[in-house]
């Protein structure tokens, strides 16, 4: 959030602002900046009655029930921002968008590699930073089956902290690599982990086959996830 605000300030452009998921400590900065430029600002209302399932999420926003195909509570706040954006365009630009168009659009929205289900029992998620990893952990905590995490990341990432976040929600941890010069050595990831049930493998394709009673989650890098998707759908 801070980086976004600094970037806007450097550009010196008058922006209307639609904001969600902002650290409360930063709100006065956003408010002051927008007010000085006499621009419009809308902070999304609270999302309520959230339900997250294996097939997506549903929630209520300003009295209306919405369904989205993306998993995770954080996606409902993203959806609320999308709703406010459309409402803004309707009012400011006089776009003609019917309520059912919004409902249908949210339901069809899809983000590859973000808690994406490749097949029942197998999920992939970028989770390439602390915030993304915590969001993934929050979702895993809603899964009522043992979770097998298959992890790879870039060397430049804070992998020790991310592994520490994942360990409590993982029944098993597998460390591997992907085709990128910046990929972290999986043996170092293995040695960094304090998990009692861990391993290092070179070929993760055997884990593309679902295992009954277990949810497999591939995560740690968007590069890793991109490679996985390509290999999975070409097998």
Image (spheres, grey):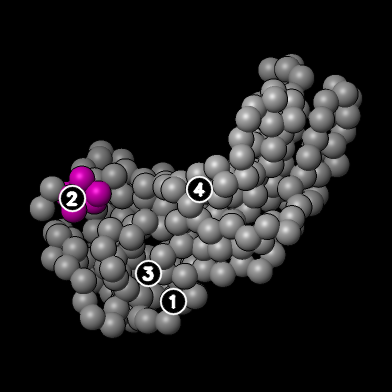
Q: Position of residue 132 (x, y in %)?
A: 50, 54
Marks 3 and 1: in contact by CB < 8 Å?
A: no
Q: Secondary structure at mark 1?
A: loop
Query: Does the magenta run of residues contain 230?
Result: yes
Which residue has dot 2 on it? 233
Q: Nearer the N terminus, badge 2 or badge 1?
A: 1
Number of numbered discs on residues: 4
Asked if residue 102 lies left or right of residue 189, the reply is right
Q: Is residue 169 above or below residue 69?
A: below
- The residue depicted at 21 percent of the width and 71 percent of the height is 210
Q: Position of residue 30 (x, y in %)?
A: 80, 36
Q: CA distance from mark 3 to mark 2?
A: 30 Å
Q: Position of residue 44 (x, y in %)?
A: 74, 48
| Mark in front: 3 vs 4 | 4
Which residue has dot 4 on it? 104
The tag on residue 193 is 3
The residue lying toward the viewer, choosing from 197 and 9, is: 9
Asked if residue 36 lies left or right of residue 41, the reply is right
Span of residues in magenta: 228-233
Asked if residue 81 lies left or right of residue 183, the reply is right
Furthest residue toward top: 12
Q: Nearer the N terminus, badge 3 or badge 2?
A: 3
Task: Name the magenta segment's main secondary structure.
Answer: helix
The tag on residue 143 is 1
Q: CA distance from mark 4 to mark 2?
A: 27 Å
Q: Nearer the N terminus, badge 4 or badge 2?
A: 4
């Amino acid at each position: 959030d801070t980086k976004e605000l600094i970037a806007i300030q450097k550009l010196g452009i008058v922006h209307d602002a639609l904001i969600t998921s902002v650290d409360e400590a930063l709100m006065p900065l956003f408010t002051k900046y927008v007010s000085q430029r006499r621009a419009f600002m809308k902070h999304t209302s609270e999302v309520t009655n959230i339900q997250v399932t294996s097939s997506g999420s549903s929630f209520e926003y300003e009295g209306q029930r919405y369904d989205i195909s993306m998993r995770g509570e954080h996606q409902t706040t993203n959806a609320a921002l999308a709703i406010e954006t459309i409402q803004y365009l309707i009012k400011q630009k006089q776009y003609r968008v019917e309520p059912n168009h919004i409902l249908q659009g949210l339901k069809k929205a899809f983000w590859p590699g973000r808690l994406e289900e490749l097949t029942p029992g197998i999920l992939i998620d970028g989770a390439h930073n602390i915030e993304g990893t915590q969001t993934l952990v929050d979702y895993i905590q809603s899964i009522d089956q043992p979770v097998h995490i298959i992890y790879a990341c870039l060397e430049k990432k804070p992998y020790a902290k991310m592994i520490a976040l994942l360990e409590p929600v993982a029944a098993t941890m597998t460390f591997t690599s992907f085709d990128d010069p910046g990929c972290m050595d999986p043996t170092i990831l293995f040695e960094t982990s304090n998990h009692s049930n861990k391993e290092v493998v070179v070929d993760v394709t055997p884990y593309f086959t679902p295992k009954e009673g277990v949810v497999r989650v591939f995560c740690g890098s968007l590069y890793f996830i991109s490679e996985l998707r390509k290999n999975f759908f070409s097998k």
